[in-house]
Amino acid sequence: MNTVDPEALVLSVAARLAEDQPYADPSPAERDLGATGLTRLAGGDLGGAALLLEPLGFTLERGIDAASGKPFALAVAETDATTQRRWGLYLVDLSAPPRLSVAVPHPRSDAHTEELGFRLWRAVPGSVLAMATVHRDAVAGTADHARATGTLFHRLWTGVLGPYGVPQVQPHGFADVTAPEQVAVSTGTGLLTAVAVAVADAIAATGLVTTRAWDGTAGVGLRATRNAQGIAATAAGWVWLHVEHSRSVRDDPARWHPAVDAVAAAVTATRPGERAP
């Protein structure tokens, strides 16, 4: 296992995504092996993780994130042009037990969301970053990790992190013409939590026009009611957040950097399972 720059790797993988890529979900047995391997990765058992993940085509790395000083473990699926095993990139902060799931189902297609996700991972100790490594529109849209349930990306949430009380935040993006707001925060169909309220209030405090699905101000198309991870979270009572950013916000680091930092501060300061007053 060699030391790599995790930010550079995340961005380079996202940059190579394209709509014409092949893709196939892992089989149930492969998902079982992958989930167990990622559980070991999240627990710091890198040798055990390698035994399970490398036969599935994953490359494992470990190192220190130069900017934050955080020790990390990384598993990234095959990304060559012909592979169907585009089963995700998983980056674990080993400085603390898992505390936050940062999930990026639409890198590149929701432009810059891989950057938002990585900044959030870097800001919250104990974060686990899960990023799709296939374009959402590949294979006639069946590769969309926010809608599919047969992915390892989904299984990490439903079988590993969600059941252990780790909240999930998903950064997404929408076109400026879609809705007038700059950021929309939603819990999908789930119950409102103190984390959701704190996140929305913290983003709004940076000066961005922020709407909320739970009070009806968010655009109908920005409420994430069909997101597979959100539906699973609702059924199980897990804490889950969907944060949509307009394209003009995502194109301007001077606006989205403070917004992501506000999310990190709010998540860190709030107990995950606390319900909103």
Image (cartoon, rainbow, N blue to C red):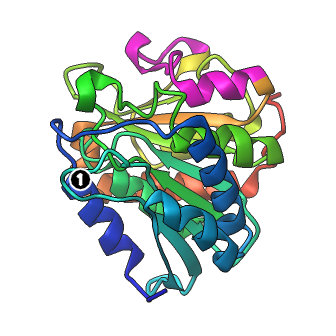
The image quadrant where one finds the C terminus is top right
Describe residue 264's horizontal placement relative to residue 136 as left or right: right
Describe residue 139's horizontal placement relative to residue 88 as left or right: left
In percent of width and height, residue 195 lies at 70, 41
Residue 88 in sight: yes
- Kind of residue at badge 1: Asp
Residue 266 in sight: no
Mark 1 residue crowding within 10 angstroms, few (<14) / some (14–19) / many (20+): few
Q: Can you tell which quarter of the image residue 245 is in?
A: top left
- Residue at image point 69% right, 29% down: 233
Q: Is mark 1 on a helix, strand or loop?
A: loop
Find disc 1 in the rendering and name its residue: 252
- Residue at image point 60% right, 53% down: 34
On screen, 80 above or below 201? below
Residue 262 among those drawn in magenta:
no
Describe residue 53's horizontal placement relative to residue 125 as left or right: left
- Residue at image point 79% right, 27% down: 237
